[in-house]
Image: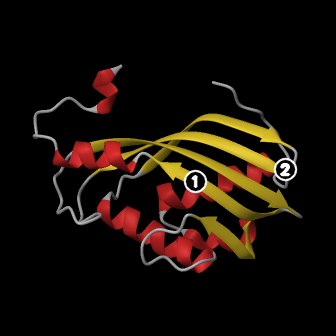
């Protein structure tokens, strides 16, 4: 794993790490500290409003669908004011999600994010998620192998 480390809570890496905590905990109050008021999220999810409040709504949707939702960082790379993060997210599909009723299946999805940090706040985030792979998992027969079994 290629990761930079810093003990300074105001360093871009620490700010970006804090961004992911609400996915695990559901507590979006940290966004008051790490997201700029005019934070830009690209692309927006269907129905998502721009800004920190829009992200808080997305966290609520993810956590309702997968209460055990977690994010594991594979790589965090800091260059200037940008922090790139490669993640694997996982959870158990317990609630409606993207038109799919709960399946009880354990899912994994790969994501890539680039965050821009200025003056101690994330001002923009660009992200890509493997939603096609996720939909394949949700549509797969109950006994199909999980991505972890793919190697």
Within the image, what quadrant is residue 109 found in?
top left
Residue at 85% across / 47% down in the picture?
A: 8
Question: Foreground residue, 109 or 42?
Answer: 42
Within the image, what quadrant is residue 89 found in?
top left
Neighbourhood count class around disc 2 (C-alpha, 10 Å): few under 14, some 14–19, many 20 upward:
some
Quadrant for the N terminus in the image: top right
Residue designated by label 1: 127
Residue at 88% across / 45% down in the picture?
A: 80
Question: Foreground residue, 139 or 31?
Answer: 139
User: In the displayed structure, does residue 29 sit left or right of residue 99?
Assistant: right
| Most distant residue in the top direction | 151
Compare marks 1 and 2 and give the one earlier in the sequence. 2
Residue at 46% across / 69% down in the picture?
A: 58
Q: Position of residue 79 (x, y in %)?
A: 83, 40
Question: Foreground residue, 48 or 59?
Answer: 48
Q: Position of residue 60 (x, y in %)?
A: 42, 71
Image position of 102 with respect to 1: above or below: below
Label 2: element kind? loop
Q: Position of residue 6 (x, y in %)?
A: 82, 39
Label 1: element kind? strand
Q: Nearer the viewer, mark 1 or mark 2?
A: 1
Question: What's the image's color scheme?
Answer: secondary structure
Residue designated by label 2: 11
Image position of 67 with respect to 55: above or below: above
């Amino acid at each position: 794993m290629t990761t930079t480390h810093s003990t300074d809570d105001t360093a871009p890496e620490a700010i970006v790490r804090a961004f992911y905590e609400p996915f695990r905990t559901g507590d979006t109050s940290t966004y008051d500290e790490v997201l700029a008021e005019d934070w830009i999220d690209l692309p927006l999810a269907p129905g998502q409003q721009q800004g920190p409040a829009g992200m808080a709504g997305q966290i609520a949707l993810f956590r309702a669908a997968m209460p055990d939702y977690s994010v594991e960082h594979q790589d965090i790379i800091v260059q200037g004011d940008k922090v790139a993060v490669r993640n694997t997210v996982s959870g158990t599909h317990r609630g409606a999600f993207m038109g799919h009723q709960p399946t009880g299946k354990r899912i994994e999805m790969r994501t890539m994010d680039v965050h821009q940090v200025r003056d101690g706040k994330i001002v923009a985030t660009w992200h890509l998620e493997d939603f096609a792979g996720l939909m394949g998992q949700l549509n797969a027969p109950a006994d199909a192998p999980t991505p972890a079994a793919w190697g």
